[in-house]
Amino acid sequence: MAVKIRELPEEELVYGSFACAGCGGILAVRLALKVLGPRTVVVTTPSCLLGVTTFYPQLAFKVPCVNVTFPSTAAAAGGVAVGLKRRGREDVHVLAVAGDGGTVDIGLQALSGAVERGHRFIFLCYDNEAYMNTGVQRSGSTPRGARTTTTPVGLRGRGEDRPKKDMMRIVAAHDIPYAATASIGYPQDYLRKIQKAAQTQGPAYLHVLAPCPPGWGYPGHLTVHLARLAVQTGQWPLAEYEKGRLTQKKIDNPRPVEEYWSIQARFTHLLS
Amino acid sequence: MREYINGNEAVARAVRLARVDVVAAYPITPQSPVVEEIAAQIASGELDAEYIRVESEHAALAACYGAAVTGMRVFTATSSQGLAYMFEMLHYVSGSRVPVVMAVANRGLAAPWTIWADHQDSIVCRDTGWIQLYVETAQEALDTCLQAYRIAEHPEVLTPVMVCLDGYVLSHTEEVVEIPAQEAVDTFLPPYKPQRVVEPERPLVFGVGAGPDLYPAFKQAQQEAMDRAREVICRVDEEFYRIFGRRHGGLVDPYRCRDAEIVLVTLGATTGTAREVADRLRQEGIKVGVLRLRALRPFPAEEVRRALAGCRVVAVLDRNCSFGYEGAVCTEVKAALLGLKEPPAVVGFILGLGGQDIRQADIEDIFRRCLAAGSGAVHQVAAAQSR
Ligand SMILES: Cc1ncc(C[n+]2csc(CCOP(=O)(O)OP(=O)(O)O)c2C)c(N)n1
Ligand code: SF4
Ligand SMILES: [Mg+2]
């Protein structure tokens, strides 16, 4: 049974966070928890998400939340999964959440290890394509051309000069039981993938594009619009890996990338 | 039952007897046999535990932390580079008040590369908020690992414990070890019953952030827990004695200190050598003693002061160096003696780095040099080994 947006529970499991208006990351987590439900443990790590949810005494999660060091999100999630299993609590989902930096860069080794060991957990990477929490520095997930505070634009700088790391191929190389990319701009597709991840016996990986108004330089009401445009311009392919097969949703008539670039300060130098 | 085993095996026996639930560890010389032995115990069915075969030490401690917050009794072990690699997680675990027990087979740190014993690896972790106990024998390694769970899990303490044993000298050297009976251990160490665990029915946050208004209160709580740990360590050692007939001194282990003119302060396995030298010098009429520090954190300042107050010269043997100053233990001992009316002179000796043997002759030399030292002023002679 596919989840329908209209049938999602009213109850909010992450509520009262300090996220910016229009934060794609918090939306990604909020939707994931609506599908997974209250029998979930969140394991998270330094990132905007941690910064805006669990600063004592503020506790924005209505589910247990285990914070850990930046490099070891997946390792801690593995420990939680093993412990819950031993306590006979296999009814509880373990949702590890990290930003793109905490996934594709500093957290990659732990993610690789935990996936290879086959713990039953869901790893959710909300990708805002830079280190937002520390002030918009580039990450391995920053797309080519994007301006960040460590890939500035100037006489000799043209923004990020390397392509975005292809995480799907990396997790697929582990022959992970289930992996998918998604965009918060396509919630029906995203919800279906969360549900699939939840039903997976073993590790599942979700990589969701999560636009960030201050980091990308656009007004907050455009978050969902941009999350859709990224897909429609071919900048963010919706892909799935299952039973050894990597499939990608084809975009029939991609819209010109300029449409996507022109409304984000991080790309405007590419158009002049 | 008695077995002829080395320190690593003794640690693995303790892990089994403690009925540890989850082990996450990464191999490194000279700790590796601990994890091999634990894996073997699990494979043979002797130990009903999960072994998470992590890809690094950072992950080992993160996995222990994750399992511990779900209510598991957890164990890890490492050495040297591995402990250094854990550094970030060490603070995280102690700050989160998670009672992990870890064995450290002490080894020097690169560069230059070494696999041999000194205490640099754990000494540089003094300030990570872990309780540190240094053992002298394989027997004490076993006993202390069992005690460590009682200490770490004590609701008034809730602080992780490092059990430090000298690489090779203890980790790889066989001795006769009394293996306690499982029933007796079960009496001494009941199952772990945490007050707070991860469960959806009672959502809690572990590892919160805290601003300048609240952060100090968390740290104050850690410091107070360490203060309480002093008494708990002693009480647990006494209780252990009542059940098993062995005790290891609690915080400090003084030997012939009462009327001593010169006392040598030691950590770990070297102490046995020092006692033999002390006995020999005593026969010559030279009044010397040995004070082994079993706990380095919490630091037993009171006990050190009491044991050393009457002597003329204190020699401190450091198997570590705080570069730019002196051996770390020397600094701590000096600080503990401040305020005494007639404080003894304190002389530091840095020996046995990177597995360099500490021979009886070296220790005798230390005693004789101190004998020659005159005044009662507190001073420091940083000395490399005299060879
Ligand atoms: C070991 C370590 N290095 C650096 C940091 C500083 N740090 C905290 S969050 C962060 C960036 C997070 O970026 P990302 O994972 O993409 O999440 P975002 O904030 O963008 O949502 C960095 C560099 C840290 N906490 N720990
Ligand atoms: S900076 Fe970006 S990622 Fe961080 S809270 Fe604001 S919108 Fe969200
Ligand atoms: Mg990011």
Image (tube, coloured by chain):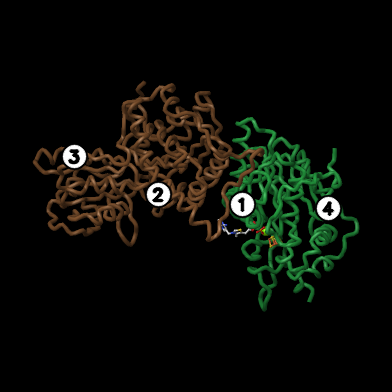
Chain colours: A green, B brown
Residue B28 in view in this figure: no
Q: Amino acid at mark 3?
A: Arg
SS for callout 3: loop
Q: Is residue B16 left or right of residue A108?
A: left
Which picture quadrant has residue B364?
top left
Q: Amino acid at mark 4?
A: Tyr
Q: Is residue B190 left or right of residue B333?
A: right
Q: Position of residue A185 (x, y in %)?
A: 82, 55
Q: Is residue B17 above or below residue A2?
A: above
Cβ of mark 1 under 8 Å from ligand 1: the answer is yes
| Host chain of mark 1 | A
| Host chain of mark 3 | B
Residue holding disc 4: A186
Q: Which mark is residue B256?
A: 3
Q: Amino acid at mark 1?
A: Thr
Instruction: Give the CA distance from mark 2 to mark 3.
Output: 30 Å
Instruction: Give the CA distance from mark 1 to mark 2.
Output: 27 Å
Between tags 1 and 2, which lies in front?
A: 1
Q: Is residue B88 left or right of residue A14?
A: left
